[in-house]
Amino acid sequence: MNTTRKAVAIGLAAALIQAVMLIAFAWPATNIAPRDLPLAVAGPQAAAVEQKLTEQDAEAFDIRTVADESAARTAIENREVYGAIVTGGGAPRVMVASAASPAVAQQLSGIAQVLSGQPAAAVQDVVPADSDDPRGAGFGSMVLPLVMSGIAAGVLLTLLVSSIALRGVGLATFAVAGGLLSMAIAQGWLSILPGSYLALAAIAGLVSFAVAGTVTGLAAALGRAGIGVAALTMLLVGNPFSAATSAPELLPQPWGAIGQLLPPGAAASLLRSVAYFDGAGAAAPLLTLLAWAAAAVILLGVGIYRTPRTATVPAAQPELAPAV
């Protein structure tokens, strides 16, 4: 391929990547809608509310009937549902958890207005978002920097550190320092996350290790092509489908579920669970991140195993001059 054809091919490839990125980021954002969103109903008119919601959109909600308002509150606090509609004693009341998803809380508030027929319907925020970040904009903005910095760290370690074993040392250093520093900014300066600083720093460190480790691990096992595979997976699939600014059940399926199996989505869910819900619902995203971190270590081990070892050549012995 001559130089002109190579330049044209690179330009076309870059345009294709641009188009794919536009689709990956814009398509989910323009298709936000509830899809089997867990919602509790309680009270004497629970069946009627369920029927009304099902008639409007049979696939919008995964409706679960609970005994009373107390049971509905417990289900929200345990991250079993995103909200609840409680009937009896007047107009239906809606309970939400803006900490779980401000976007869902807003949609459920709209449902409250429809059910009660009042512009200012009764909505109770059971688990509110941080007062310094009530709309979750700051929280949603945290995920992309964690992913981008992890990719950058993995690329730098791959290109600048020749020893695969020492790349592992760099990964551990990045995870510890990055986790402590990022949460110091998020909590100490920006005040957008409540909860234990050390617990949240450990999560940020695990996310950093999982993302950067995937880059370095795939590069060690597959060569330089592994960098592109890892980066595109995290950016084109992981980040837009992380649901950091919405909820997995608001995204087109199965992409919302797939996003939770990648580090960005698992990071958002785990941070929410630990910061706002005392660890409720943390098991699945934690196991996901640990699996990615373990896979990174295994890939680094594969890279070390495949690295050709230089044979040790014994030093030549000086020849003795013949005796005169």
Image (tube, rainbow, N blue to C red):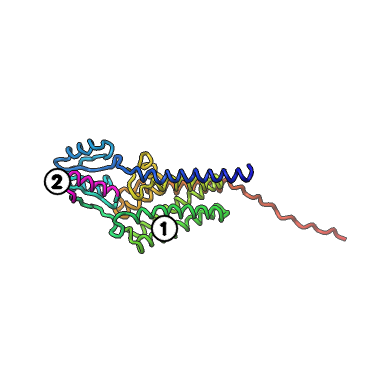
Considering every residue shown, the one lying at the far right of the view is 324
In the rendered structure, which segment of residues is drawn in magenta?
103-120
Q: Residue at x 30, y 49 (%)?
A: 103
Where, quadrant-wise, is the C terminus in this rendering? bottom right
Helix, strand or loop under label 1: helix
In this view, the mark in front (2 or 1): 2
- Residue 305 in percent (x, y) is at 56, 46
- Residue 61 in percent (x, y) is at 26, 40
Does the residue at mark 2 contact the one at mark 1 (Cβ under 8 Å)? no
Based on the picture, tell me whether residue 240 belongs to the magenta stretch.
Answer: no
Between 35 and 56, the one lying in front of the other is 56
Q: Is residue 98 left or right of residue 218?
A: left
Q: Which residue is mark 2?
A: 91
Considering every residue shown, the one lying at the far left of the view is 89
- Residue 293 in percent (x, y) is at 45, 49
Q: Residue at x 61, y 47 (%)?
A: 308
Which quadrant of the structure image shows residue 187?
bottom left
Q: Is residue 301 left or right of residue 83?
A: right
Q: Is residue 216 left or right of residue 52?
A: right
**In the image, what residue type sits under mark 1?**
Gly
Please tell me how crowded label 2 is: few (under 14), some (14-19), or many (20+) other residues with Cα within 10 Å.
Answer: some
Helix, strand or loop under label 2: loop
- Residue 13 in percent (x, y) is at 53, 43
Q: Residue at x 53, y 55 (%)?
A: 156
What numbered label is drawn on residue 179?
Answer: 1
Please tell me how crowded label 1 is: few (under 14), some (14-19), or many (20+) other residues with Cα within 10 Å.
Answer: many
What numbered label is drawn on residue 188?
Answer: none
Distance from Cα at disc 2 to Cα at disc 1: 47 Å
Which quadrant of the structure image shows residue 68?
top left
**In the image, what residue type sits under mark 2?**
Ala
